[in-house]
Image (cartoon, rainbow, N blue to C red):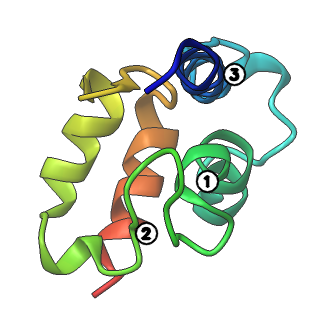
Amino acid sequence: MNKKKLVVLLFSMLIVLAACGKKDDSSSSSAKAGDPEKLYNQKCAMCHGSNLEGGGGPNLKSVGSELSKEDIEKIILEGKGNMPGGVLKGKDAEAVADWLAEKK
């Protein structure tokens, strides 16, 4: 791989990671607490796709057939791989985990 392609790849990865980055703005969130689809669209869709199809992050269309609600919530809270922890917290993390666990 030549240097130009490597720089473009690294820059692209940096943008994806920044978009998924940790930001605590729960007090100014426009989604109602506990509205999992709106929370997902605001905090997760940039990496996991607006239709759960994946992109920078994995496809989540059938995540509930692979992981329990508790496992999903743990990943949301603690992070995994390139995904940072704490993108959602508390009741918001629980609501999104419950919603995603239904995706079979």
Q: Position of residue 98 (x, y in %)?
A: 35, 64
Cα distance, mark 2 to mark 1? Answer: 9 Å
Name which residue lies at 39% across and 68% down.
60
Residue sitting at 20 percent across and 36 percent down?
74
- Across and down, in percent, residue 8 comes to 65, 23
CA gap, disc 2 and disc 3? 19 Å
Task: Nearest to the eye among marks 3 and 1: give it.
Answer: 1
Element at badge 3? helix
Which residue lies under the disc numbered 2?
99
Q: Give the Cα separation between the discs numbered 3 and 1.
A: 13 Å
Task: Specify which label sits upstream in the sequence, 2 or 1.
Answer: 1
Q: Is residue 23 left or right of residue 27?
A: left
Looking at this rendering, what residue extends furthest in the bottom direction?
104
Tell me the residue that label 3 is attached to: 26
Give the percent coordinates (x, y) of residue 62: 30, 80
Q: Secondary structure at mark 2?
A: helix
- Secondary structure beneath disc 1? helix
For residue 5, what is the image quadrant?
top right
Residue at position x 43%, y 69% in the image: 99
Say which amino acid is labelled 1.
Answer: Tyr
- In the picture of the structure, the residue carrying the numbered disc 1 is 40
Q: Amino acid at mark 3?
A: Ser
Circle 3: is it few (<14), some (14-19), or many (20+) Cα within 10 Å? Answer: few
